[in-house]
Amino acid sequence: MEYFLTEEQQTIKGLARKIAEERVLPVRAELDEREEFPRAIVKDLADADMFRVFIPEQYEGLGGGCLELCLVVEELSRICGGVATTYAVNALGCYTLIEYGSEEQKQKYLPDIAAGKKLAAFAITEATAGSDVSGIKTTAEKVEGGYLLNGSKQFITNAPEADIYAVIVLTDKTKGPRGASTIIVEKGTPGFSFGKKEKKMGIRASSTGELVFRNCLVPEENLIGRAGAGFIQAMRLFDRSRPGIAAQAVGIAQGALEAAVDYAQQRVQFGQPIITLPVVQDMLAEMAIQVEAARALTYAAARTVDSGARNLTEAAAGAKVFASDVAVKVTADAVQVCGGTGYMRDFPVEKMMRDAKVTQIYEGTNQILRNAIAMELRKRKGRTV
Ligand SMILES: Cc1cc2nc3c(=O)[nH]c(=O)nc-3n(C[C@H](O)[C@H](O)[C@H](O)COP(=O)(O)OP(=O)(O)OC[C@H]3O[C@@H](n4cnc5c(N)ncnc54)[C@H](O)[C@@H]3O)c2cc1C
């Protein structure tokens, strides 16, 4: 399929592929096995200016949009979904600053993130607040000298490795969701520590942990935008970042498809390579169609984000739901095509199957996103835009 990428977009995609194949591929199984954060690869990505891709030029970025981010995430995911998660969530943390930060906040944080000197994270989930984010309990009480944070966040990607955390807190607990705000908390702030490190099914090269705030005093200038705007900011950010999760799903599925085709060409049973068997051909063809359809929807959603369109929910959520469902199905089918070998951990498709699952869960479960799409349909009575 021709996606009419510009020369610059093709260069970015090519560079991401080179890093993925040369630097990630040799260590992906080991990173997964040891559940190890990919520090050396983060440095490789920084050296190749990959963290500059999605940051505006005035903050030392390359000024790329959602599509450029998706191209990098897809290429990294084709080799390792875990490495891609680290990269994509860093971008989500940055989007908070790019979209809602003051000029001072952008100047303070974005150039270091662009250079790969600092990593960002985004924290909304708590034990009582998953799909229902209005259940957050972490408070930020206004006191002399800033905000005093108390509470904890769970399942936070890039914790404890990240340096800059965009945290959604209640600055006014009497107002419920309208009392939520986004506050930047830097690693090393007294009263901010890290709790449990999660052991995961997949994306094990990424780090997922708990943030704990105990009388953590954060300067007032770390408030992002207006107090009380935290939830609306978060919902709009997810509309921008969900195509990135869709791209992760597309990349994982693409990797699995390629591995399955290679295997089917080499594996001989009943005197012939299994790729000559109509049932196997049928599976592979269906996988290829699904991956391409997911890619087309993902790029279209990313381009919708980059167009400046106001209502992004349907495009972004639709791409994320479709691509993640495809990734789960295609990776499972890849294991099937590879038979017993596919089930073994020294062959990559079982990891891809484990990595794919989370794309149906984070940044809004697919059930929640289907609800959101249905709400949009109800609003416009099913009419096309
Ligand atoms: C590896 C990983 C990394 C993550 N990284 C981050 C991060 O960096 N920052 C962050 O803030 N969070 C992060 N999360 C949290 C993630 O966004 C949540 O797990 C997700 O939103 C779902 O919340 P939950 O796990 O509490 O599930 P629940 O909300 O408890 O849902 C359980 C089940 O109920 C269903 N359900 C719930 N409500 C409804 C409804 N109204 N209609 C239909 N079905 C419903 C869900 O779809 C799901 O199937 C991460 C999670 C994982 C697994």
Image (cartoon, grey):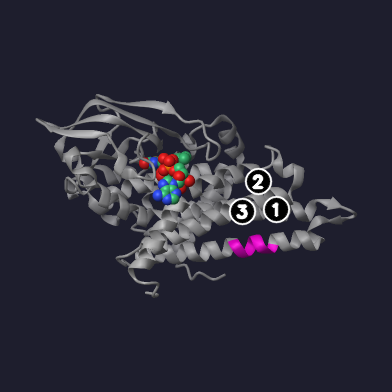
Magenta region, residue range: 285-290
State which tag comes first along the sequence, 1 or 3: 1
Q: On the rendered structure, is 76 left or right of 280?
A: left
Q: Do the residues labelled 1 and 2 touch (CB within 8 Å)?
A: yes
Depicted 138 relative to depicted 274: above or below:
above
Q: Going by the picture, which residue comes out furthest to the left?
A: 144
Q: Can you identify the residue that label 3 sits on?
A: 329
Return the mark for residue 79. none
Residue 190 image point, x, y percent: 24, 24
Q: Does the magenta stretch include residue 7?
A: no
Q: What residue type is labelled 1?
A: Ala
Specify whether tag 3 is near ligand 1 (CB below 8 Å): no
Return the mark for residue 349. 2
Q: How crowded is mark 3: few (under 14 residues within 10 Å), some or many (20 or more)?
A: some
Gap in Å between the C-alphas at discs 1 and 3? 13 Å
Q: What residue type is labelled 2?
A: Val
Q: Can you identify the residue that label 1 sits on?
A: 260
